[in-house]
Image (cartoon, rainbow, N blue to C red):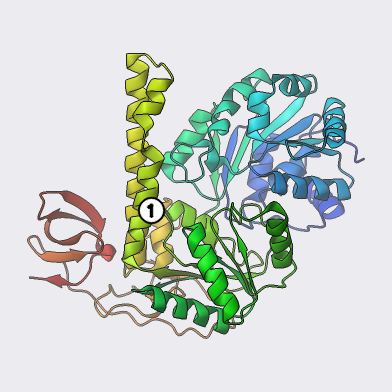
Amino acid sequence: MLRRQLDVAVSTRALKNTMSRVFGVDNFRPGQEEVVRAVLNGRDTLALMPTGAGKSLCYQLPGLHLKGTTVVVSPLIALMKDQTDKLDSLGIDASQVNSGLTKAEADEALARARNGAEFVLTTPERLASDPEFVDTLKRNTVDRFVVDEAHCVSRWGHDFRPAFQELKAVIERLGHPPVLALTATATPEVVQDIVASLGMRAAQVINTGIFRANLRFEVVQAPNEGDKRRQLADILRTTDGIGIVYTATIKQVEALHADLSASGFEVARYHGRVGLRERRDNQERFMRGELKAIVATNAFGMGIDKPDIRFVVHYAIPGSPDAYYQEAGRAGRDGEASRCVILFDARDRRTHAYFIAGRYRGVRKRLAAKGLDGARFDQAMRAHEERRRSDEKKLEQMLLYAQSPACRWRFLLDYFDDPAARDDFRCGTCDACRHPPEWQIARPETATVFPRPADSPLPRPERHRRPPLRLGQRVDVPVYGEGEIKRIDGDKVEVAFADGERRKFKQTFLGETSV
């Protein structure tokens, strides 16, 4: 096994030597060295890096330059196994401890953890429910506690897992080693919640941005089921390579799988009710490139390490921009041009509204069954109500994305408070940039329009100047309907609606206007 290097004052040259010798990588990707330095300096760190940016190297590389064990918490056993196998193949002592092991495998994994493995990968559930395992880890020096997919920590995140909330206590039991939290997506609200929930101290937040120039976002209006299916078949016929088709329900997976198969497409299905063996077989066929597409619910995708996914189609609108970026971002991890398409029918909103209602139905009864006292009961009810409103707000934002005439990338950058979000930002490749409405704001000469891949056939968009807005003017707002401008503050406008409600919007979200 590789020997640990004890000097944390490591030069860039030494880090690159390790990268080249062990991982076969010659240069850092954007943000990687900054995160590695923070880890080596013992800082609690939250790194926001897009899918495919090389988050694993951010803890694997410094782990080889630190004297103790790096504990890595992951929500997926399949991903854990993949990472452990890769580390073992590189001669690095790595152990995975989870419920997917046989007794013999579990005994061996615990023995390796007890003997001070370089990396120990496990689940939040195992740490929360097995104090003896935590004690085993405590006997060794834990030099870094890593939380992968850290958005799962936050109650405001789209993949919240209650067991992640127990990690703060585990970190304290281990003597609070420096914490590294990694995620591809987090709004400012989620960032704050991750830091607080993990008990991170003076956390250094490193945000490399979410923008990926090779992802080409599109929204295709499909007002009925027949049109959706025709549009989907056309995308599969005209787009080279393999992809993912996401649906909102298991019923949709089954119907689409049958329809596409009957049309001659080589497709497979994936959802929670498909047998384990078939799921594994279908995933392996997908990874080998034997399919045109896999039709799936959101149960498929996290931890899928296939760099050449050429398209991700959402047959129904996702429930939030957080979920959408995470899922669409599985395309094009090799940096090549890839399509991210939503087939939009406004009636799909009802499906997500039903899901949201279901998540919070019966909350009062469940909390009462726990025997909470009055104050704790009221606090818990308020927390659930806040989460429900947050889920509804995120669904509204997703509907705005689908109906906005503005640059798709600009919308996502604004939503995640990305450093690249500026008034003049235009990606130049999304459908809104390629085919802007007549009235859309003219692009200034200084606008940031990112270059497309050299083989892109897309023309440069021509933009037309929109008349300035005025107080009292009637405007059409996607999702909300018609309203009257009551206040103009820079690029933001306050609009009053017929029901008396007032909301603020960026000017680029507003539709056609009238006097």
Identify the secondary structure beneath mark 1.
helix
Residue 222, can we see it? yes
Residue at left offset 55%, top offset 29%: 198
**Residue 81 placement (x, y as % from top left):** 76, 46
Could you say which quadrant of the image residue 360 lies in?
Answer: top left
Residues 479 and 258: in front is 258
* Amino acid type, label 1: His
Say which residue label 1 marks: 352
**Residue 352 placement (x, y as % from top left):** 38, 53
Left or right of 120, for residue 321: left
Residue at left offset 7%, top offset 70%: 515
**Residue closest to the far top:** 373
Residues 456 and 235: in front is 235
Residue at left offset 52%, top offset 86%: 457
Residues 279 and 240: in front is 279
Left or right of 222, for residue 307: right
Residue at left offset 67%, top offset 28%: 127
